[in-house]
Amino acid sequence: MTELPPNDNFENGQNDEGPPEPYNSWEEYFEDFDRQLDEAPRTTIRKKIGKPPIRLSDDIPDSEIEEELNKLIELLYENLIVIDFIHDIDK
């Protein structure tokens, strides 16, 4: 079974390039993925979330750390950036 390439120009069900060509091998798929990654525009996470003011950890009292962390995680989530922690965060 052949895989279809990812389609970065697909928007609202429309694609000016027509249907994607199937890959003949996984190697072609990964080569295309690497090419698209190399050609993709670069940005920082902070820029992506709107350059909000972020308090330095040294400036946050221990009693407010959890609240600030939750604010930051929520801001990331609102911008479709999800961080999973393997371990619970110590309070």
Image (tube, rainbow, N blue to C red):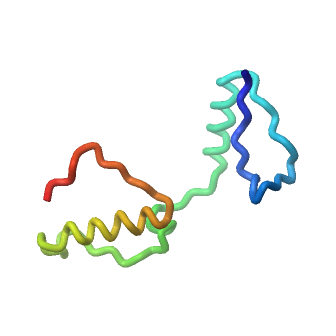
Which residue is at 53% across, 61% downward? 43
Which residue is at 62% across, 56% downward? 41
Image quarter where the N terminus lies is top right
Q: Nearer the viewer, residue 51 or 65?
A: 65
Q: Position of residue 30 (x, y in %)?
A: 63, 31
Question: Is 63 situated left or right of 8 in this image?
Answer: left
Toward the bottom, the furthest residue is 53
Question: Is 26 situated left or right of 67 in this image?
Answer: right
Q: Position of residue 11 (x, y in %)?
A: 75, 57
The part of the image, by quadrant, that contains residue 37 is top right
Which residue is at 62% across, 38% downward? 34
Q: Nearer the viewer, residue 90 or 50?
A: 90
Which residue is at 73% across, 34% downward? 4
Establish if 67 lies above or below 8: below
Question: Is 77 situated left or right of 20 in this image?
Answer: left
Question: Is 33 situated left or right of 60 in this image?
Answer: right
Q: Position of residue 26 (x, y in %)?
A: 65, 24
Establish if 34 lies above or below 53: above
The part of the image, by quadrant, that contains residue 65 is bottom left
Q: Position of residue 36 (x, y in %)?
A: 66, 44
